[in-house]
Image: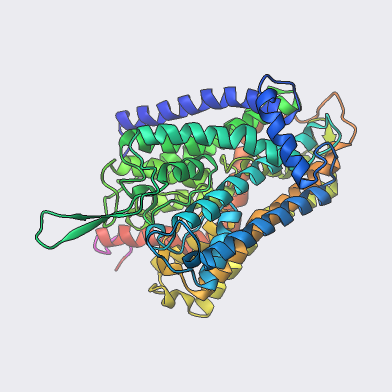
Amino acid sequence: MLTLEGLFVVALVWGIVIILAWFLSKYLLLVFTDSKSRLDRIFLPVENFIYAISGIDSSKKMGWKEYFTSLFLLNVAQAVIAFFILMFQQSLPLNPMHYSGMSWSLALNTVLSFSSNTNLQHYNGETTLSYLSQMSAFKFLQFTSAATGLAVGVAVIRGFAGKTKSIGNFYYDYVRSLTRVIIPLAFIATVILISLGVPQSLGGYSTISTLQKGAYEILYKGPIASLVSIMQLGTNGGGYFGANSAYPLQNPSQISDLFEIGLMMFIPTAILFLFGRMVGDNREGRTLFLAAYAIYGIDLLIAFLPTTHIGEGMEVRFGSAAAVFWTVTTTAFTTGSVNASLSAFNPVVILTAFFGMLIQGAPGGKGVGAMYMIMFVIVTIFLVGLMAGRTPEYLGIKIEGRDVKLAVATFLTHPIIILVPTVVAFAIGAEKAVGLAANSIGFTQVFYEFTSAASNNGSDFLGASGNTVFFNISTGIVMWAGRFLPMLFMLAIADSVATRKRSPSQGLKTGSLSFVVILIVSIFILTVLTFFPFLVLGPILQFLQGFENSFGGVIFGF
């Protein structure tokens, strides 16, 4: 349960992240509004060189179709390159452990995972991947997928701001996301992680003799710190080790544990503030921030209600409270990294993890989380407009029927790509291939697998046991559908509203605290109504069965 000490730690992390994110949002405004900066002397030559060798006109304004096509094709090309690196890593350099290539289905799943910012891992990295694969395939995709998400989030915000009458240019947003935001921040984070004891090496693994005669231990070393920095900062979540940040070398101390939690919160929180700055009204950014953090806080409080037991496989170095804090945060920010085994948690903690992934905007991943919050705002305004009998408006813009349809399509994409494959998995008996039974525990784990994939989260119960053709292919499809379809719909909305006339007077005060409450209630109702039957069959039933067993079946009459 949450103690006063634990509450202080949570409040401290929140406070530091929120303050730093507020200042980062000022910098992001300069980066993505083409404002002059002293840093231009450093970054402009690099960026202009990239545009020149790529034949890109970064000043060209793009419509939503061109913007989406550009980002999609670039991500396809990056995934294809990574696929061949994984398939043929045995013939490539920087493979001192002489690992063979991945199977085609695992390689396909992995590149679809990392290129979609999901980082679902059906393998153990330290015993499967060469240094080249970890760096040129995975770390590369973690940077590029993070830049894609940030660029889309900024483009959607730019469209609603309406100041440039356009959603912008994808290549401009993408390159600046990398050169001016993600790479510099990741470099700083890497240096800090190294100072905290996270290894950074290309010297190969070491074999160490133990005190027991004839026994030895393999010390897995590699470019770990640089991968951890971008995995957390870019809300990627894919770690160097199969155990992720539960592994001591990837997360050696309580300080590193809190620092990694803060990293995954940093950019998504700044984007919420950036929204207010770009639309010219900080109250609107405050609305998104308060709603997102309120839902995140509610999830944390619910998760801390039960006595979270230390079960088999639980990381005990930091205590169960730290593990709960990490798990709720990693799902609320769609990161997916873990510092403890999910199977050891109370089902109520898993339920809160589900809520974080199903909502995706509380606060969600960098860029994409703000995009989902805007989607929820549009749906909420439409519902309020129906009840009040007036035309829905947002930021002085009339919300048209097409906008609502696209927002609803964004919302419905999620349940379709989660629920359909979950049902199919049990219909064909796919759960048996990974050692699961058709009970509440097995249902929770399969349901969680597809929820994590659709939410581009990446945390899962299956791990390397999920390396079957069915789960590799099905989750791969779900990850890309969950990534790119919502982007397509929201870019279309943003492009449509970018050129509309804006009224100086606004009917519904979306910058008010009362609207924050309405938005929170709306998000919970929409999510619960959509997914409640499946949650009942999974973590809720699992909790009730455990509660029943603890009382010998007396309460339920058995």
Considering the image in quadrants, where does the N terminus appear? top left
Query: What's the residue at 65%, 37% (across, down)?
Result: 177
Report the span colored magenta.
551-556
Residue 339 at least partly seen? no
Residue 62 at least partly seen? yes
Nearer the observer, 172 or 24: 172
> Could you say where residue 488 lies in the image, as x and y percent from the top left?
75, 52
Magenta span dominant secondary structure = loop
Query: What's the residue at 48%, 76% (across, down)?
Result: 430
Q: Where is residue 167, by image quadrant? A: top right
Query: What's the residue at 71%, 31% (across, down)?
Result: 45
Nearer the observer, 508 or 6: 6
Asked if 554 appears above or below 296 in the picture, the reply is below
Q: Is residue 215 left or right of residue 541?
A: left
> Could you say where residue 357 lies in the image, as x and y percent from the top left?
54, 50
Asked if 109 appears above or below 431 in the picture, the reply is above
Report how many numbered discs are placed on residues in the image.
0
> Could you say where residue 79 lies in the image, as x and y percent from the top left?
62, 59
Residue 113 lies in the magenta-colored region:
no
> Could you say where residue 393 lies in the image, as x and y percent from the top left?
81, 35
